[in-house]
Amino acid sequence: MKILIIITNRYRGPIPVIPLGACLVAESCDRAGHQVHVLDFMFEREPLHALNSLLDKTIPDVIGVSVRNIDNNDMQHPVSFYKDLMLLIKTIRRKTDAKVVLGGAAVGVMPEALLRFTQADYAVLRDGEIVFPKILEMSLMVRMPDNIHGIAWIEDNVFRIHNGYSDRFSDSSVVPDFHRWIDLPAYVSRFSPIPIQTKLGCHFKCVYCTYRKIEGEDYRLCDPQTIAAEIVELEKRGVGDLEFVDNVFNSPYDHAIALCDSIRKVRTNIRLQTVELNPLFVDDNLIGVMEHAGFVGIGITVESAADAVLERLKKGFTAKDVYKSSESIARHQIPCLWIFMFGGPGETEETVLETLASRKVYKPKRCCTFHDRHTHLSRYRTRKHCENRRSLEPITPGNARAGILLISIS
Ligand code: B12
Ligand code: SF4
């Protein structure tokens, strides 16, 4: 079959993210014997024009639409990306009878709303490289078979869903040959590291998190040696920077240790990074093996160092764990990005001050605060509490409503 995969993401903040998932889907369709074309909107000046010209030349049987972001998650300057899908779908419908299948992280978060909004034929909730080729197998797609897990559709105005997860790491590749599908140099020249995923699933229950909806609660782990072998291949192809995009890098702890050991053994020079450490599983052993594996930067999202807030956010760790992890990190050389979020449930003047006091242990060299213009927490003036920092925007009285994000580098 002729397949077109459209990568709709054009957002470039903080970096233009390399579309790992959509490329994995393209490659698995190719392996299944389909004729695959990828249209990446990221660097297209006029994306709809590019789509129109393509559809003038060739009519695909099925069009997969990859949707990563619903919005920009920015309360001060909100942008809704999903609205752009309307014109895209209209263009497709005007030019072709192709079935339209939505996929991507956004679809895992809100499949019904996106199906209803776009009127697409099907939504793939996750694991696209396994699920999408199965949909293609039913060439006419007259009805959905019961044995495909991870799809949804609207039938007689009723939302239908087949939940469930696939064993993604069993036989499909972990890193696609990006050059075949996208303009990789254009991404790399804008400081985008190559993304790699070593696990799916998270058993924590943080109240604000969508990741379990996308990936599930049960862990699905990739064999550490497979990842190490992929990294060797990537280095041969000239890759310099790689980022682990796991929901939490260091849980399960044993998997993270085994992974770092495997990477250390293959002696790569690739610069590794992750911003997804959980303080509960940070100790000297972990940071040591990460340094030996080639990590040049890490990030830890603790949100708060006050028990009253951590408990209400259901983070699954305590302020004591935050302190313990910061002591371990401070004993090593690796630069660490500390990410806090103020204004969550249970936040008071005392809890803000408690969290800011933790800087004495992790000793930030620089701090930036991003905050909602109208948050009443503004009066706590994080600026006053950070030493040697460059504050992007001081928090001033009178610019208040809900959340402040504090990012510090130690
Ligand atoms: C790692 C990550 C980041 C990293 C990316 C680092 C990097 N080098 O890639 C950083 C921190 C930079 C980042 C930034 C942002 N992120 Co982010 N990120 C993630 C995270 C944790 C993993 C994404 C990932 O790479 N997954 C691995 C790949 C393999 O999976 P995938 O892309 O989803 O693809 C699979 C399926 O979706 C499907 N699929 C994908 N395409 C297609 C196409 C078809 C046709 C089909 C059938 C299937 C299909 O199959 C694929 C393979 O199984 C997700 C949450 C999550 N658990 O998914 C959030 C997530 C995607 N991010 C999100 C957001 C909002 C953002 C930001 C806008 C935040 C901000 N304001 O800065 C930016 C946007 C960046 C950009 N330029 O687009 C949201 C998107 C949903 C929403 N609410 O809008 C998510 C879901 C988290 C959340 N808040 O809910 N992010
Ligand atoms: S640990 Fe991370 S991925 Fe897991 S539920 Fe909490 S925020 Fe989500």
Image (spheres, rainbow, N blue to C red):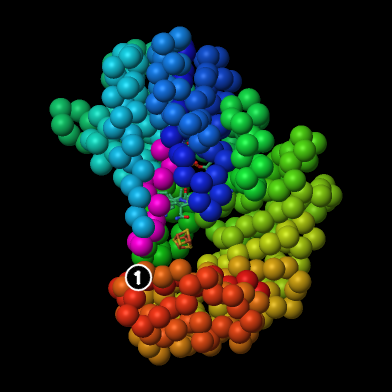
| Count of numbered badges drawn on the protein | 1
Q: Amino acid at mark 1?
A: Arg
Q: Residue at x 60, y 78 (%)?
A: 389
**Residue at left 68%, top 62%?**
297
Image position of 364 with respect to 50: above or below: below
In the picture, the quarter occupied by the C terminus is bottom right
Q: Is residue 22 visible?
A: no
**Image: 231 above or below 25:** below
Is 150 left, or right, of 25 in this rendering? left
Q: Main secondary structure of the magenta part?
A: loop
Establish if 349 lies above or below 47. Answer: below
Residue occupying the far bottom of the picture: 350
Given residues 4 and 219, the one toward you in this image is 4
Q: Is residue 376 above or below residue 191?
A: below
Choose top left, top right, bottom left or bottom right for residue 249.
bottom right
The quadrant holding residue 24 is top right
Callout 1: 10 Å neighbours few (<14), some, many (20+)?
A: some
Q: Of all residues shown, which one is farthest toward the left?
A: 156
Q: Is residue 2 magenta?
A: no
**Residue at position x 60%, y 64% in the image:** 299
Instruction: Name which residue lies at 48% across and 56% down.
Output: 202
75 in magenta:
yes
Along the viewing direction, whichever of 300 and 28 lies nearer the viewer? 300
Q: Could you say where residue 200 lies in the image, as x and y percent from the top left?
A: 52, 48
For the question of whether residue 214 can be seen, the reply is yes
| Secondary structure type for disc 1 | loop
Label 1 beta carbon less than 8 Å to ligand 1: no
Residue 65, given in percent of the width and then of the height, sits at 41, 30
Highlighted magenta segment, given as a residue range = 67-76
Residue where numbered disc 1 is placed = 373
What percent of the width, then of the height, locates residue 293?
A: 77, 56
